[in-house]
Amino acid sequence: MFDTALTTADFIFLAKGAGMTIVVTAISVLIGTVLGVIFGVLRYQLGPIWAAPLIFVLDICRSIPLLIQLVLTNAFLGTILRLNLSGFTVACIVLSMYTAAYCAEIVRGGIEAVPATTRRAARSLGMTWGQDMREIVLPLATRIALPSWIGLALGVMKDSALVYVVQVTELLKSTQILITRLQEPMLLLLICGAFYFVISFPLARFGGYLEKRWSND
Amino acid sequence: MFNYTFQWKQAFARLPQMLDGAAVTMQIAILSMVLGILLAITLTMFRLSGSRILSAIARTWVEVARNTPALFQIYMMHFGLGSFGLHLSPFLSILLGITFNNAGYLAENFRGALKAIPETQTRAARSLGFGAAGAFGYVVLPQMLRIAFLPMTNQMVWAILMTSLGVTVGMNADLYGVVQDLNALTFRTFELFALAAVIFYLITKIITIGARLIAARLFRY
Amino acid sequence: MNHKFVVGLLAAAAFAAPAQADKLDDIIASGTLRCAVVLDFPPMGMRDENNNPVGFDVDYCNDLAAALGVKAEIVETPFPERIPALMSGRVDVGVASTSDTLERAKTVGMTIPYFAFEMAVTANDKSGVKSFEDMKGKTVGATAGTFEAIALEKQVQEWGEGTFRPYQTQADVFLALSQGQLDATVSTSTVAQSNVKTGNFPGISVVGKAPFDIDYVALFTDRHEYGLLNYLNLFVNQQVRTGRYAELYEKWVGGDLPDLTVSGVYR
């Protein structure tokens, strides 16, 4: 049953695709988290009225299919502005905004979960807003937000499968290319699925473990 | 200003076709949610049943659905099953793919919601004479659905967005498929997809606001 | 006064240069020719055992780059992405078996034909489709965004029965065909023969011609790059003249060399 036409060259090809998935995910999550923290803090500080434009833009990133976001950004930056950006760049830009949009909500939720009394106590002790944020809010909010953030990062990794539309050869596309040549869809798809599973499952469990450990029971 | 001549009229002329596509999108999303909720409740009951096999089935389903990409699941439904001779039409492939995904995520949401319901509820129900199924169905389930209502709304939005993946399995009647076909004809990529984006945004906004209104009426206490 | 004159002259020269440079100059100056090639379309474009791009279109792009004196860069584009890739500046020329339809000519500039395809019907052996007419009422499909997909979809609508499904890649179409999810497909006879010959897709065979017009395909580039378009036209002519077209055809397809002219009209 296991005689297969897969060669080492093919495994290397798949590994390159997997590497591309990881690179795109890592860059997007990194930039997206930084942006998300900034947006989340802004959103919290400015309140719902002044932050309305920001809320609107982030809402758009969460309400439109990722495929359309990728195609639209590609068309806008490419055909209209005529910037000669590679598909990889466009994919990272779109995924970063996508991550930032969800991360902003997570960060906002984290900040709001810090008891107001604690923060007022900090300010009344003479801490500036910056010190309050760094010493009091950051540790507490991170505890609350980290499990959700891990979930978000894993979600971005899974959604990275969609960047094939901007010609980035990530894992799922590489698998499809091999299926074309070798005609073993089941085996190749199982390998592809196993890869995502092997990365996502332990991290998701770890997030669950952290959540349990840090919960207030 | 831009080195491009926008031709919005071409996009707007195709609006009726796109709205037909949006209707198909909603069909798929709603069907997949209904089936997904039913399956998720079943999976939750499997986990509570105490049988090792049923519990293992439920756990495997949930873990696979939550740890693999949705595109992968949909592709599997069509081409993976197809290699065994099991042919699903594109509509069924995308529907079952999204349902599989929904069921996994919702089952996990339900599990979290159940943890928030104190055991005393079940015990009180049993002591009033409900059977095990009755206690679950009449007392625990409504509370679980209420707690999980917000995650369910999120999942509904995701289901709508996931229908766009139908093009990979030959589905061209949903909104994304229609726009892709139109794009191949006219190459007005930006105009067409921008219009589709607006339609998707409106749909998801209506669903979210509608859900909030329903929650306000239904969960008044 | 003297050095102001020189500065003025230099400024005039600096402003004059960009106004004259066109894409042909840009390609030669940059040293790289980026071609859009579809690698999902044997034998025009495909991947060999080392997953490197090979095929008629790949060789054609290499020939073009050699003629220009630059390096060739093969940019893989799926069928629906050929023209968008050019529009967004990701490729310079499209050597991607693109049918020269009038609709496309509104957006890009197309050269004279460099290849011609006949359309063939490939069917799953178990479906009972033995000719084009047999496809009526069956489930048929083709690659989204291609000339034959648009024509086939129109035909299915005219027949009024049967279903049409577009798949994203040629490979997906043939995979679905061999799995029996499609009863038949219309594709170019070259890709049909090539796929059937590999034996990768069991249970399918070519059953006849499709009565669509001969599909002439052209190179394409920006609509207003007349310099480059003229060069490409001459290049296609020279490929035929020097026998290179016949040589490549024999290497990748074999059989009767298709005529690239339409009789009775000048161009």
Image: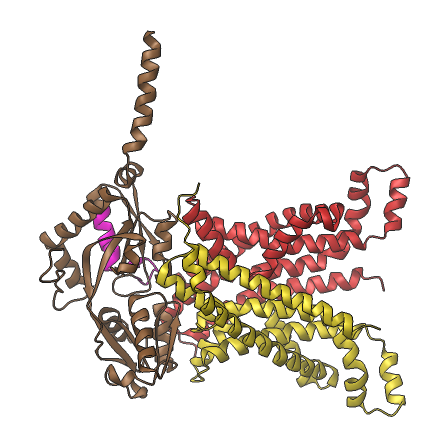
Observer-nearest of A141 and A170: A141
Q: Residue at horizontal 87%, vertical 41%?
A: A123
Q: Residue at horizontal 28%, vertical 74%?
A: C186
Note the chain letter of the red one. A
Question: In the image, is residue C69 above or below residue C5?
Answer: below
Report if residue A169 is visible in the image: no
Report if residue B30 is visible in the image: yes
Q: Does the magenta portion include C55?
A: yes
The answer to whether residue B40 is left or right of residue C94 is: right
Note the chain letter of the brown one. C
Note the chain letter of the yellow one. B
Q: Position of residue B157 (x, y in %)?
A: 62, 67
Q: How many marks?
A: 0
The answer to whether residue C94 is left or right of residue C230 is: right
Q: Position of residue B81 (x, y in %)?
A: 47, 80
* The magenta segment: C46-65
Q: Residue at horizontal 64%, vertical 46%?
A: A34
